[in-house]
Image (tube, rainbow, N blue to C red):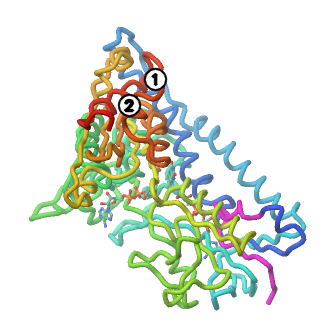
Amino acid sequence: MTYYDLAIIGSGSGNSLVTPYWDGRKVAIVDGGTFGGTCLNVGCIPTKMFVYPSQLAAAAGQAGPLGVDLRLDKVRWQQMRDRIFGRIDAISEAGRRYRDEELENVTLYQDFARFTGPKSLVTAGGHAIEAGHVVVAAGSRAVLPQVPGIDLPQVHTSDTVMRIDQLPERVLVVGGGFVAAEFAAVFSGLGAEVTQVNRSAPLLKSEDALVSERFTEAAARSWDLRLGWTLSAIEEHGTGVRAVFAASEGAGSQTVDADIVLVALGRVPNTDTLDAAAAGFDLTGDGRLAVDGYQRVLSGGVPLPDVWALGDISNPFQLKHVANHEARTVVHNLEHPEQLRRSDHRFVPSAVFTRPQIASVGLTEQAARAQAAGGQIVTAVQEYGSTAYGWAMEDTEGFVKLVAEKATGRLLGAHIMGHDAATLIQPLIQALTFGLDVHSMARGQYWIHPALTEVVENALLSLDLPPGG
Ligand SMILES: Cc1cc2nc3c(=O)[nH]c(=O)nc-3n(C[C@H](O)[C@H](O)[C@H](O)COP(=O)(O)OP(=O)(O)OC[C@H]3O[C@@H](n4cnc5c(N)ncnc54)[C@H](O)[C@@H]3O)c2cc1C
Ligand SMILES: NC(=O)c1ccc[n+]([C@@H]2O[C@H](COP(=O)([O-])OP(=O)(O)OC[C@H]3O[C@@H](n4cnc5c(N)ncnc54)[C@H](O)[C@@H]3O)[C@@H](O)[C@H]2O)c1
């Protein structure tokens, strides 16, 4: 049994916990996967590095109405892939080497581990570890449905699909969430024939209903979209596969032939492989580690001393900026046990880097109405096409939707679909977070003319609020 002052399970967001405070103290980092975790190696970063060139390629099909005839000559997939992973793999390896070889006080165990007690672990290789403080940052993994053929080499998750050797001609995307939306857009933008099949309608159903509805329509215009079908089997067919789907309601089946299949049916926290329940940690109904507002792991509803968790293993958001925020909370709390700080989960934004892009923060209209308890909710929808920059783009899809409380003029939620939505939403995140009311936001500052941000200004002005509200 080796004793450490701090043991961190997971080198994704967990890696940022090794601050100078730990110099001269013994730290163990345990990770059986690729150093740097999901976001760096198989998540946010490589996906967006594919999204950008795919957008450039897709622009060829969008320029015609503006009087510019573009043609997509060729996509050099291998060069694109190698540029992306040439950069990412080097960052991962440099991070691993720094922790493993250069920091004297840190020991890196490149192995999976499971708990034998609240502050003791054993690695798969048999190393027993005990620690004064434990931080669980072991993330989540992709769900695979147990259907015949799921193990075929043509079947991928987001972990493997970005490393394939050539751009497939036909891609089948199964699922209707964030991962499915992003990869369907990437592959179709690059010229592959994409079929997306989802169990239910509409797509992206955690979004505001108008966003889900309009994105589903946009997706159906861009690729072959089939809703209401559940994957039941995959079989080899020539060099590719044939996937069989059963009608989600009623009888009937259909098949889709493709070169590869991307399965994107959600992610589950890695608490099972950690033996978290055996160590006495409380789990939420969906299998996450239960934590309090200070990121302390609970046992029997009570925070365990010096055991912390952060990121996908414990929060329901499954977003990197949330994991980073929680890591900052844990860094502070480890270093200042007398002045614990809470994580702030009030206004967690998200963006889906699909085509068109989507971003949201705060309450959807449906959630706001459910919570209103008699108070009146107002909404406004402003089309990009109603502003000068929207005219420049000849935009027909983009819009900003705002949700506010009538009596107070308080903004409750913002939802954007269209060009640069993830960037355009930032002032609205700021307004929600710092409690800026709608009128002050709209009229208390300049809005650059004729920037696309005018669509946000006009959406704020369109809300039917009392004067000054
Ligand atoms: C395709 C894709 C795209 C995404 N895009 C975005 C995006 O654009 N924006 C965004 O905000 N979020 C995005 N996300 C989500 C984001 O990647 C995650 O929320 C974030 O990486 C979670 O960080 P984490 O530190 O909690 O876990 P991770 O980064 O997953 O780290 C957990 C680590 O723990 C290790 N581990 C697991 N079990 C054990 C064990 N028993 N013993 C030892 N080690 C273990 C794993 O090997 C892993 O390295 C995306 C995710 C995916 C899959
Ligand atoms: N841009 C981003 O921030 C970004 C991008 C990608 C992923 N992520 C994160 O990664 C997580 C995982 O993404 P995801 O797209 O895999 O999950 P998701 O939760 O977004 O979507 C899962 C989809 O699969 C469907 N589904 C679930 N089980 C099913 C089953 N048995 N049969 C058929 N359909 C089923 C759901 O209805 C849903 O449409 C997300 O929660 C997201 O937070 C974020």
**Disc 1 residue type (three-letter):** Trp
Q: Which residue is mark 1?
A: 447
Query: Which quarter of the figure has residue 133?
Result: bottom right
Of 151 and 285, which appears nearest the observer? 285
Answer few, some or many: residues within 10 Å of disc 2's Cα (few below 14, many 20 plus, some between 14 and 19): many
Name the outermost residue toward the left: 250
Query: Which quarter of the figure has residue 308?
Result: bottom right
- As displayed, is residue 44 above or below residue 199? above
The reply to whether the magenta stretch includes residue 391 is: no
Residue at 45% over, 69% down: 268
**Disc 2 residue type (three-letter):** Val
Q: Which residue is mark 2?
A: 456
Q: Quadrant of the N terminus?
A: bottom right
> Does residue 240 show up?
no
Residue 72 image offset from top left, x and y in percent: 44, 22
Answer few, some or many: residues within 10 Å of disc 1's Cα (few below 14, many 20 plus, some between 14 and 19): some
Residue at 51% over, 41% down: 166
Name the outermost residue toward the front: 468
Left or right side of 238 for 23: right
The residue segment tinted magenta is: 1-18
Residue 359 image offset from top left, x and y in percent: 41, 43
The reply to whether the magenta stretch includes residue 11 is: yes
> Does residue 348 show up?
yes
Left or right side of 111 for 163: left
Residue at 36% over, 21% down: 62
If the picture is divided into quarters, which one holds ligand 1? bottom right
Residue 28 image offset from top left, x and y in percent: 77, 74
Q: Quadrant of the C terminus?
A: top left
Instruction: Look at the numbered disc 2 and say if its residue's Cβ is closer than 8 Å to ligand 2.
Output: no
- Mark 2 in CB contact with mark 1 (< 8 angstroms): yes
